[in-house]
Amino acid sequence: MRRLRSTLALVACLALPGVAPAATDAGYLPPETLVLQAIAAHPQVQAAAAGARRAEAEARGLAAGAHEPTLSLMSQQRRVHGGLDYREYEAQLTRGVRLPGKARLDRELGRLGREVAGLQLADAEHQAARLLLVQWMEWLRAEGGVAQAQAQLELVQRDRDAIARRVTAGDAARRDLDSAQAALSQAHAQATAAAARCEAARIALRTTFPSIPLPGRAPALPEPVADDAGAQLHIDHIVSRSHEIGAAEREAERLGRAALRARAERRPDPSVGLRWLDERGGEERSLGVVVSIPFGGAARSATADAQRASAEAGSAMAESMRRMIQREAEQTVRHADAAWRLWRDSRQALEAVRASTAKVRRAYALGEAGIAELIAAQRQEQESALAESDARANALEAALLIRVDAHELWHDAGDNDA
């Protein structure tokens, strides 16, 4: 929290015209209730949830300890020279005893194991949310491509039919009809490719998140909005709320405790018990205390050294994870800004191309331009419209990815605490 307060002073100088969290994102995203249910049902999340339950059970086992009572029973027949026989019995009950400090370390290991598993579960949910966002926006992007291709196909079809009528009336050359027919065939091919891409996106969503219903018609995408918030503020939110960093740091701490536990294990735990004897048919009976003390050797020392090395590696991995998340956070925020700028330029280009195409169409109607010029202008307009559609979806997706990574979208409210 102190880091965020200090960061607020930098917002004014670090602001980027990226993409703001759209107020209308609920109009083109699936309902959050369904999203959270779909995330919880994802196989990776289910596996992480099972891992959390396993960590809970392991923590209980560590708290209880590995030592268990051992009962030994023996019955024997004693024969004494001279013909006397005796029935004799022996019983021994022993149990290992953890030396001072080991039980505390075991409880700490269990607690840290639970925390690591809990953070890994939260990260699995986060990764599932990212995957859903990517697949959902790919479907919307593909649907936009289908709409653009279909509109172009209808336009080219109308032009081809109009030219065919002019050829029949003798007002146009046959080669104009051939050019229009070629353009129509190309438009059909582009529409087929767009439909295939859309179907692939639908299949990906349907198989990965089967509980998310897909509407028959994709919702329209709003225009991305420039973001006046600070880039560094977004980056700090992403880094400070990262479950991956938290899990790596807790795992490093757990490995450190495991190293201490292995060091303590160089002094083995003793076993204490009672021994009861019944000899010579009950004529002699005894009750005693049994103490067994193992002596640690080279194997225990080597295990302690190995655990210490693992702890050092865990600390290094935690630092590596923090640097990686820091890098990815900066790239995500900068990419969102670049995506918004690209969409802005694509929109301006589309407006210019549409104006140019309108002029070419008027010139063609007046006989001042040929069919080749019209077809080229329409093709350029289609390409510009598709580029603007893709850039719009990309900009919105980049902005939403910041919100997902900052745990402001499709996460529990508790994940927002920095």
Image (tube, grey):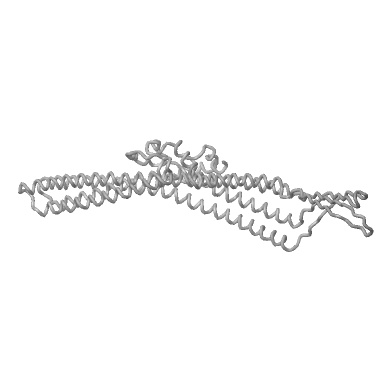
Which residue is at the far front? 83
Instruction: Determine whether, in the image, residue 4 is placed left or right of residue 340.
Output: right
Question: Viewer-proximal residue, 206 or 170?
Answer: 206
Instruction: Determine whether, in the image, residue 93 is placed left or right of residue 53.
Output: right
Quadrant where the C terminus lies?
Answer: top right
Give residue 95's position: percent from left, percent from top.
78, 49
Report whether residue 12 is seen. Answer: no
Which residue is at the far right? 82
Give residue 239's position: percent from left, percent from top.
52, 47
Question: Viewer-proximal residue, 18 or 332?
Answer: 332
Give residue 318's position: percent from left, percent from top.
58, 53
Q: Which residue: 62% across, 48% down?
A: 113
Which residue is at the far bottom? 298
Report whether residue 217 is seen. Answer: yes
Quadrant where the N terminus lies?
Answer: top right
Instruction: Determine whether, in the image, residue 412 is placed left or right of residue 385.
Output: right
Q: Which residue: 54% across, 53% down?
A: 321
Give residue 39's position: percent from left, percent from top.
48, 42
Quarter of the rendering containing residue 266: bottom right
Q: Which residue: 44% across, 49% down?
A: 332
Question: Viewer-proximal residue, 74 or 38?
Answer: 74
